[in-house]
Image (cartoon, grey):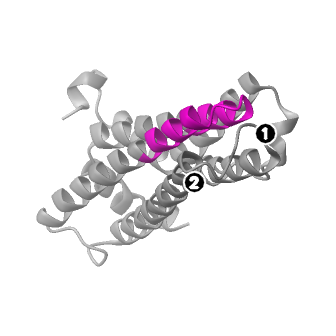
Amino acid sequence: MACANQPEVFAAGVRTLTIGMGLANTVALLTGSYCAVRAVTAIKAGATAACGRWLLAGAGTGAAYVVIKMTEYVHLFMAGYTLRSSTFYFFYFFMTFFHLMHVVLGMIVLIVVASRCRRGHYLGDTARGVGAVESGASYWYMMKPPLRIRQLGQAAVLRRALLEQAVQLFAFDGFLLQKQISRHPQPLPMLLH
């Protein structure tokens, strides 16, 4: 609604964002979702060590997201943009910071579950281990109930998880990316700075 009421304010705000950082964050989170799905596959196969490694890799992609997002915030703050700069920046900082906190909590969940895997709390393909890893992975890529993982084949789980994550990420970031690309007729590599 705010965007519809103030299109020029939002258009100006979008032009200040860096496509390269948004793209890198999207790739990082999609890769993290892939790692979470691989962790579920590993625990179901009884490979707790591999499961732990995949979960830590997923948390690592979250750390990459945090570093990139904080770098973006620093650049914007140094350029003089704050929550009070405009309606666009209020929504942008509020929504992306809320998402950042979700990612940080997801990293904590993945690290805790990975740690428990490595310490032997989840042995092989037991229901307790599978349930814990599925729950952590579900939080990471926001699949609704963990039961859905058991109902789908492993390849379908991966495709669905990546698709759902992409839809969530592009719901806001993709809107901004599309707006910025439509205002810059040059090829995409020229926009990545």
Give the mark toward the camera: 2 or 1: 2
Q: Is residue 178 visible?
A: no
Q: Which residue is mark 2?
A: 116
Residues drawn in magenta? 36-59
Which residue sits at x=28%, y=21%?
A: 187
Where residue 41 sits in the image (x, y, percent)? 68, 31
Discs 2, 1 touching: Cβ within 8 Å = no
| Amino acid at circle 2 | Arg
- Give the Cα distance between marks 2 and 1: 21 Å
Where residue 177 sits in the image (x, y, percent)? 40, 41
Q: Point out the image quarter for the C terminus.
A: top left
Q: Point out the image quarter for the N terminus.
A: bottom right
Q: SS at mark 2? A: helix
Vertical relation: 31 (above or below) 103: above
Give the side of residue 13 with respect to residue 118, left or right. Answer: left
Nearer-N-terminus badge (2/1):
2
The residue at the far right in this view is 151
Where residue 89 sits in the image (x, y, percent)? 33, 67
Task: Judge by depth and name the residue closer to the eye, 9 or 187.
Answer: 187
Q: Is residue 190 visible?
A: yes
Give the side of residue 97 with respect to residue 4, left or right. Answer: left
Vertical relation: 8 (above or below) 191: below
Q: Which residue is mark 1?
A: 149
Q: Is residue 41 magenta?
A: yes
Which residue sits at x=58%, y=39%?
A: 36
